[in-house]
Amino acid sequence: MFHRSTADINKSHVLDEFQKLDSSQRVVFATIAFGMGIDIPDIERVIHWGGPRGLEQFSQESGRAGRDGRSAVSIIYFSGYDLAKGNCSEEVREFCKTEDCLRNTLCAYFQLDTSGYSVIKPDPPCTCCSNCKLKCVCGFCSESQFLGRELDNSSVLDEDFNTGIKRDLTLEQRRLLRENLLDYKECLIEEESELSCELEDFALDYIVKNAPYLLCEDDVISLGLVSPEFAADILTLIEEV
């Protein structure tokens, strides 16, 4: 563990051990205190728990990896709660939701020239982000370990989900569910409920996308998108389609 309140002697121990080739210390849980001035060349992966506050912070945190010139991976684990509660900038929210190339999105934000540059190639090794790999034709990217955008077994829920139990929803049923969710939001707005602001478009889309796995109120709450008061109503809307 490496954070602002970590004792200096423990910080020194982490820094000394983490960069040894024969060290048993392979993972460090850290805050942004593990940032400026830290230069360990062979870090291969940075995992962000929750959305970074800004793209500048995301870039700096990701920059802890790949300092030896080898390829490295930066992954963000986030929920709708991270994005809906104002814990990060609008740019981060858009970055987490975009389906465009993540690398080009970052380059555009920092005004870097990407003309003539493409990560998608007919032959491996490609350097695709998790969005580009869905369009890549090299046949290698589909086997990579990038995470998809839909919740998987590690993200949710309870034992029912892990045993493969889910409800089947057709495209028409998903469309109807989204319309019902919109109607529900309109009712909350008419009632001048402050909770209506939690049901933004991306939250509705996320609920619809994962509706097959939402089998109880706890499943809905586990998404982290809305307040627990909504769980029973949302579950009812899912069951009615």
Image (spheres, helix red, strand yellow):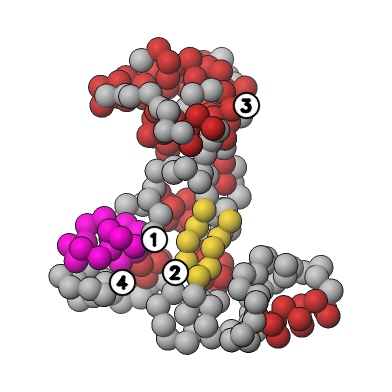
- Quadrant of the rendered structure where residue 60 is? bottom right
Q: The residue tagged with tag 2: helix, strand or loop?
A: strand
Mark 3 surroundings within 10 Å by alpha-carbon count, few (fewer than 14), some (14 through 19), many (20 or more): some
Q: Are marks 1 and 4 in contact (CB under 8 Å)?
A: no
Task: Give the percent coordinates (x, y) of residue 173.
Answer: 30, 20
Residue 38 falls within the magenta-colored stretch: no
The alpha-carbon separation of the residues under discs 3 and 1 comes to 33 Å
Task: Give the percent coordinates (x, y) of residue 166.
Answer: 40, 27
First reached walking from the N terminus: tag 3 or tag 1? 1
Task: Give the percent coordinates (x, y) of residue 70.
Answer: 41, 82
The alpha-carbon separation of the residues under discs 3 and 4 comes to 40 Å
- Quadrant of the rendered structure where residue 193 is? top right
Q: Which residue is mark 3?
A: 228
Q: Which residue is mark 4?
A: 127
**Amino acid type indicated by mark 4:** Thr
Q: Which residue is mark 2?
A: 73
Q: Residue at x 47, y 66 (%)?
A: 74
Q: Nearer the viewer, residue 156 or 184?
A: 156
- Quadrant of the rendered structure where residue 53 is? bottom right
Q: For the magenta stretch, what is the residue range?
A: 128-145
